[in-house]
Amino acid sequence: MSNLHHAAGIIFIVIGLGFDVFGCIGLLRLPDVYNRLQATTKCVTLGTCSILLGTFILKGLGTTGVKAILVAIFLLLTSPVAAHALARGAHKSGVKLWPKSVADKYEQDGN
Amino acid sequence: MKNLRWLMGFGILAASLVFIMLYPIPSLLSWQSGFLAHSFFILMLCFVMCLFRVMAGPTPADRAVAIDTLGILIVGFCAILSIPTGRDWYLDIAIAWALQSFIGALALAKYLEGRGFDE
Amino acid sequence: MKSKLVLFIVGFIVWSLLTWPLDFQHLIVGLAVAAFVAFITGDLFTPSLQAGTGFSRITRYLWLCYYVPMFLWECLKANIDVALRVLNPKLPINPGIVKVKTTLKSDTGLTFLANSITLTPGTLCVDIDAEKGILYIHWIDVKTQDADKATELIVKPFEKILKNIFE
């Protein structure tokens, strides 16, 4: 393994870890469910995909690397669907928006 | 009763923090200047933040969101574990965990919506 | 029949990626398993393919090649945006749920539109009304509450490409 591959893989893993930490800080700091869902579903998904890409670069085109790419594609496809379902479930179960929110067109339309 | 639950939650959080700080990983610390050992600590810090949101979330929806996030983080954890140990079946665990986390999130969303599972 | 063939090819590719160092025995077992799965569930997963929209149209694959890098770039921008908002001590958010319109009709197109909206800066799809063509979107920094202007800002960049790919 050359030094350049190693450095590129480590850099991808560090970027992914940073985005994971930012997403979890967002989970702690933001005020209501929908904002938290935005922060986590974006930052944590791309952070984990970046970690998997770093694994692929470090390991090369072997068993581990190909499986890592497969998991990354699967996460990119399914994570927004889960976020969408959770947001709709939260709204149907009666969770109000943050009191300083601007508009709620969904509630006005009687859903 | 509620105070007891808060006390138990804080006890679990403190125990996990102490575990993270003090637990030695001797076979991994020797690998390439211990970088990946530190990355384990960073990911475990993320786990503790998610567990805090599970403990303190004011509504059930918050807890569901935190559990979904925890599932995605564990996939990354398995991927990092597979690098220094060189065992590719950690990625099999990651695939299975991603599937299970997705289906679990959908089931939790159905439960929050207040409908039956067979719809 | 066509959808069964497509499902068979996709399943076989996924199987051979899962057992990557290509091996004769693995490939034979994969052929058997993929044929069985495609025979059982072929009509369930791809009902929209039976309507006769051509697989052989070359332009849709070219549009797909244009869509993927653009999607990844928007995704990276969204991550940096959320990270800056979270790390800012004043927490500059201005959330709300707005309503946008879309002209896409097919189920696959609507699903991909919702996924794209969820992973791009500051927006999260909450619900889809497929009959009226309305999406309800949670926006972390509401710039306008008017439905047409919000449509211009959020949906338009993706809608043109997705219309060329899936319809």
Image (cartoon, rainbow, N blue to C red):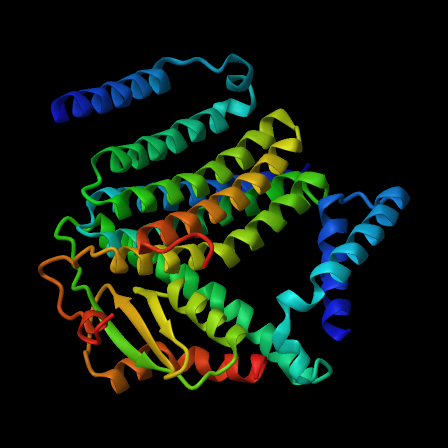
Q: Is residue C157 left or right of residue C149?
A: right
Q: Is residue B41 left or right of residue A33?
A: right
Residue at 77% of width from left, 50% of height from top? C16
Looking at the image, the residue that sits furthest to the left is A100
Report the quarter where the C terminus of chain C lies. Answer: bottom right
| Vertical position of residue C95 compared to residue C133: above or below | above
> In screen coordinates, is B50 left or right of C42?
left
In the drawing, does residue B67 fall left or right of residue C57?
Answer: left
Counting from the top left corner in percent of width and height, residue C12 is at 77, 56
Is residue A4 in sight in this rendering? Answer: no
- Quadrant holding the N terminus of chain C: bottom right
Q: Nearer the viewer, residue C106 or C119?
A: C106
- In front of the other: A12 or C113: C113
* Residue in view at x 58 percent, y 40 percent: B96
- Residue B74: percent from left, percent from top: 47, 36
In the figure, C24 relative to C157: above or below? Answer: above
The picture places residue B24, in percent across and down from the top left corner, at 44, 13
| Residue B54 seen from this side | yes
Residue at 38% across, 58% down: A85
In this rendered view, identify the residue nearer to me: A84 or C23: A84
Q: Residue shown at 76%/43% (left/top)?
A: C19
Give the x, y percent position of residue B6.
17, 25
Q: Is residue B103 above or below residue C63?
A: above
Disc tally is 0
